[in-house]
Image: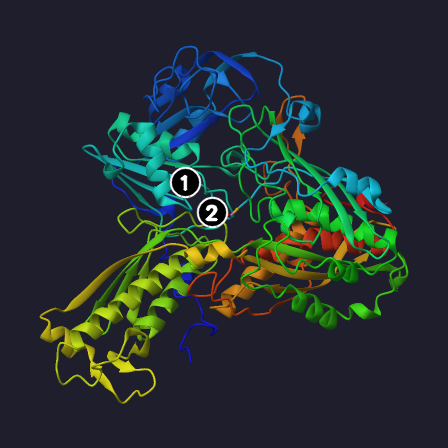
Amino acid sequence: MARYLGKETTRVDGIAKVTGKAKYAAEFQIPHLTYGFIVLSTIAKGRITQIDTSAAEASAGVIKVFTHLNAGKLGKPRAADASPTWAWPLQSDQIFFNGQPIALVVAETYEQARHAARLVQVSYQAQPHETNVVAVLGRAKPAPQEAPPRGNPQAAMQAASVKVQSEYRIPIEHHNPMEPHAAIAFWEGDQLTIFDKTQNVYGVQQHLSQGLGVPTGNIRVVSPFVGGAFGASLKPNYYPSLTAMAARELKRPVKVVFTRAQMFTGHGYRPETIQKVALGAAPDGKLQAIIHEAFHNTSSFESFSDNTTGFLKQVYACPNLHAPLKIAATDLATPTWMRAPGAVSGMFALESAMDELAYALKIDPLELRLINYAEVDPESGKPFSSKALRECYRLGAEKFGWSKRNPEPRSMRDGNLLVGWGMASSVWGAMQMPASARVTYRADGTASVASATSDIGPGTYTVMTMIAAEFLGLALEKVKFELGDTDQPRAPAQGGSWTTSSVGSAVRGAALTITEKLLSLANQDAGSPLRGTSIDEVEMFENRLRLKSDAARSVDIAAIMQRAGTQELTEVYDSKPSPEREKYASLAHGAQFVEVKVDPELGTVRVSRVIEITACGKILNPLASHSQEIGGVVWGIGMALEEATEIDHRYGRIMNASLQHYHVPVNADIHAIETIFVEEDDTIVNPLGVKGMGELGMVGIPAAIANAVYHATGKRIRDLPITPDKLV
Ligand code: MOS
């Protein structure tokens, strides 16, 4: 019977956060700090012909204005004939996107730097640019992870008796975390310390080592708290190297904080995605062929792809499938991963198409999913390590009242509002990455635990404390978990919903290794009541090592340690995925049921009710986990109805780079949301039996809403967001 795992636990860092004690990157107090403000380009492509910084430099408080003419070198020297790139800021006169950094003004105060930034005069020689993905589709290239087709999709599609074929569009979207990206850098001799908002301290360390030509051992990256990131801090962004370079040149600490507008070209975005989906089925609903072609934009200098069609290949038992992804260069900043990257985009298209197919076949949309349920992974043929999606469908339908649905569009009303019910499936990975954790257990019954992971909001501080407390047999308050520092054992980026699986397994491993050491120390005593017992039979509990089956047979841990002449035991444990995993496919799944109410005159859509059932292994902290899934649903509502980054293609410039004009859901947009877990007992996926769940929560929602809107109105909206103009 677990003491903590599986029980609702409030956040161990909650009080620090609400009282302001939790320090975010820009909040560290450093003496003699200077303030940098970034100047961005105002053209999308071309060259800087002249940059006049004299007025800015003469402005009060200004220490230096860095441009490509005087900035310290960043990155490896490049051959003179190398193709143009924008890997590092302020290294050439070339412009690759509108909103590219072209200068950094450093002053004694933030206000002085910001004011002087307006005085920098720039002349350009502009070149023709293209920022519209539709215009560059012909130049699209296969994404690196492109896999061969399954079966013979073309022939199967031709032979299929019922077919649907449609095109779906998703605009560029931005993460918009609350906390702006920021860094403070200072040098002590050749040692750099940088406070950075990041999901990956080791990734930033590696990046800065390359950029600054300094060994990784000389760089410490610190990031204890992150105010939301959602993927926007997975890759090192350009500002940490810029900040560190300026601090090195000036021999003073420098702080750089993005404005909200600067975030729109400063950390990547969900790419603009066009998907052409064709489904072919037999009259009984069995899928014969899926041809799902996806395109999205990248930049002219980096080939990013978000694996749009990766997970969707594993959802339905269809023998013939081709789901290629192609990427096309645009003169924009490089896109990046944004919550549920690829999966939420791909599943919007596939699950909308499945709804269209259900109507073409006159089969209930839920029934169609059950007819095509994948009992084994259709891509690899491997069994699933666990898959409770069938139970998610059943429970969701029952809770929602799906059986009472009249499939006829426009058949349900609430007063003058049109009511629609839609559903969709969701999928995400159950990944595990190598990770390390250090646990120190002290004779006084306290423990310190550390791993250089991140907590961008899901509750990593809390769940790691719970795992350590559980396996060390200590009360939660006796355990202190720390993260976000390259002085700690290596952990992967907090991304992909793999943190609990990866870092949690390392914390568990370290705690169990300490248990094992204590047992062997205890058994050096001939009179030990635990003699002859194996590690699997004992556990630590309240500073005693005891037999699980007979708690009376126990020894005092402090006494064992004293005999061994030590006050503490420290263990660093490296965990990695087990070879057993290779024999299985491991995924997290869910089913989404949505009710919308549409005003037929105004075209406004209200998502009045959502029931989301997910199966993502064991739930360690139901409080934080429900919060993750509810947040996923809210974001799914935003993606379906509100979010879009608008670009004026004449200038290649983002028009709505603010929270005033980039719409995200507010309280008034959100109504009843119920999230339910169908727990899976998965002994293969990792020792804790947990799967990714933070990203999963949003995956099926946009499609379920679009399907509900069709049911309400009879209008199939295939380009997000579903704004009133598309419905009236
Ligand atoms: Mo997530 S897009 O892996 O931060």
What is the x, y in percent for residue 58? 36, 19
Can I make out residue 718 in this image? no
**Label 2 packing within 10 angstroms: few (<14), some (14-19), many (20+):** some
Disc sitting over residue 179 in the figure: 2
Q: Quadrant of the C terminus?
A: top right
> Residue at coordinates 67% horizontally, 58% vertically from top-left?
374
Disc sitting over residue 147 in the figure: none
What is the x, y in percent for residue 706? 76, 51
Report helix, strand or loop for mark 2.
Answer: loop
Q: Quadrant of the N terminus?
A: bottom left
Amino acid under disc 2: Glu
Residues under labels 1 and 2: Cα distance?
A: 9 Å
Are the residues flagged by discs 1 and 2 in contact, CB closer than 8 Å?
Answer: yes
**Label 1 packing within 10 angstroms: few (<14), some (14-19), many (20+):** many
Does the Cβ of the disc 2 residue fall within 8 Å of ligand 1?
no
Amino acid under disc 1: Ala
Viewer-nearest residue: 81 or 724: 81
Q: How many numbered dots are placed on residues in this image?
A: 2
Name the side, left or right, on which 217 lies relative to 699: left
What is the x, y in percent for residue 69? 38, 15
Quadrant assignment, res 285: bottom right
Q: Is residue 652 above or below residue 288?
A: above
Q: Is residue 604 above or below residue 32?
A: below
What is the x, y in percent for residue 155? 78, 39
Report helix, strand or loop for mark 1.
Answer: strand
Viewer-nearest residue: 354 or 451: 354
Quadrant assignment, res 436: bottom left
Can I make out residue 659 in this image? yes
Q: Which residue is mark 1?
A: 182
